[in-house]
Amino acid sequence: RAGGWKKLDANNDGAIDRSEAAKVPQFAAKFDQLDKNKDGRIDASERPHHDGMHGGRAGGWKKLDANNDGAIDRSEAAKVPQFAAKFDQLDKNKDGRIDASERPHHDGMHGGRAGGWKKLDANNDGAIDRSEAAKVPQFAAKFDQLDKNKDGRIDASERPHHDGMHGGRAGGWKKLDANNDGAIDRSEAAKVPQFAAKFDQLDKNKDGRIDASERPHHDGMHGGRAGGWKKLDANNDGAIDRSEAAKVPQFAAKFDQLDKNKDGRIDASERPHHDGMHGGRAGGWKKLDANTDGAIDRSEAAKVPQFAAKFDQLDKNKDGRIDATERPKHEGRGGLAKLDADKDGRLSRAEAANSPFAAKFNEVDANKDGFVDREEMRAAFKRMHPQRGNGVGSGGTGRS
């Protein structure tokens, strides 16, 4: 997140004072509002969180807290059924209010993914000890580094947060690219030691710069998690066989389900996708496919107007059904990079001509120079998806 807590906390006392907050103007502007106890410091309990119940998304903490008392009572929680359903579970002290200390957090070690903070904290004491951390080798390997006060426990103030060369979060691509030339040179990379350590490995063409095509990506089976498609595909044949899938137990468990043609390989057409029309979001492929025949017909597509509007364009073989091979995919890892034939980091009108993007070219080309660069693409995505804020969703159009 902008300026990250750790970076702001110059004296490593676990809190942000007014001089430290001054480094991030948006944060400094909210200092007095966040400093609930008026001690001149924002401590962990006063720290702003992303809402979902976490970020800036619709239905967040601020919107729920109608009386602005800093807590959510039962009537306020009722506005979000998922939150209301967990009210009694979250209300640890049974005072009928969810205050900041009881507020749900993203897990990961940050998000909601398996192996999150809650799952690791076996004794529910709010901290992770060495034996609990051992369940996640990557976390265990960083235990001593994270345990700032050397008490043998990682508490909430020491808990690791997402950073990235990836999200727009502290230390991201834009912040590193000091001269705004769209690439990271060695001196710019030096600001992030982990990135600098991989510079030569990432600089494929050995020109002394990491450009957009060489930029590290989140993997997944989709995201940035260990065991992504490329890593699994040991023989680089573009498909995952059973022995390769065995490296990721969750993936291996779904092998037979994913292997539609039963050839013992998961190829690109069988690869699991995030829905939007791609993942697990409302209105995804599975939900649209009412008759579960693996394809979307016109009547099923009608449930999502944006999808229905593109039906004829997507139905390549004109059989009245969008099957898996015609299914739209997220771009980011594919979008700009795939269309950018001359690899100059921007799209010309000719490059965009044979894509769905062509119809919006003039709208996205903000400076009317006949090219669409990454910043124009990001800006267009934000206009079209304001609810996603600064993040260009996972694999979204603006990220590559």
Image (spheres, rainbow, N blue to C red):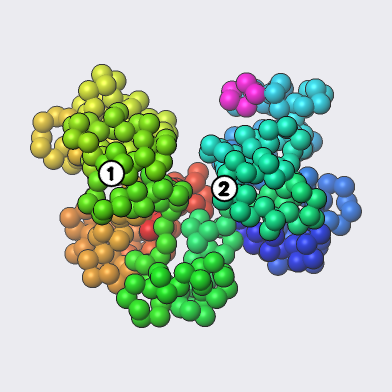
Q: Residue shown at 53%/37% (left/top)?
A: 114
Q: Residue shown at 45%/73% (left/top)?
A: 199
Q: Residue shown at 31%/67% (left/top)?
A: 346
First in sequence, mark 1 or 2: give its number.
2
Label 2: few (<14), some (14–19) or many (≥20) C-alpha neighbours in 10 Å: few
Q: Could you tell me if residue 368 is visible in this image?
A: no
What residue does disc 1 label? 240
What residue does disc 2 label? 137
**Is the magenta region chiefly helix, strand or loop?**
helix
The quadrant in which residue 15 appears is bottom right
Q: Which residues are magenta?
A: 81-86
Q: Secondary structure at mark 2?
A: helix
| Number of on-image labels | 2
Task: Depth check: give the residue in front, 274 or 70.
Answer: 274
Label 1: few (<14), some (14–19) or many (≥20) C-alpha neighbours in 10 Å: many
Q: Is residue 96 left or right of residue 261?
A: right
Task: Depth check: give the residue in front, 210 or 193.
Answer: 193
Q: Is 165 above or below relative to 131?
A: below
Q: Is residue 228 left or right of residue 73?
A: left
Q: Is residue 286 magenta?
A: no
Instruction: Work out which quarter of the rendered image holds the N terminus and state it.
Output: bottom right
Residue ranking furthest to the top: 291
Query: Which kind of residue does numbered mark 2 sit on?
Result: Pro
Q: Is 217 above or below relative to 76?
A: below
Query: Which kind of residue does numbered mark 1 sit on?
Result: Ile
Q: Residue shown at 59%/23% (left/top)?
A: 81
Q: Secondary structure at mark 1?
A: strand
Percent x, y of residue 275 = 37, 37
Percent x, y of residue 179 = 49, 78
Instruction: Work out which quarter of the rendered image holds the C terminus and state it.
Output: bottom left
Q: Is residue 83 magenta?
A: yes
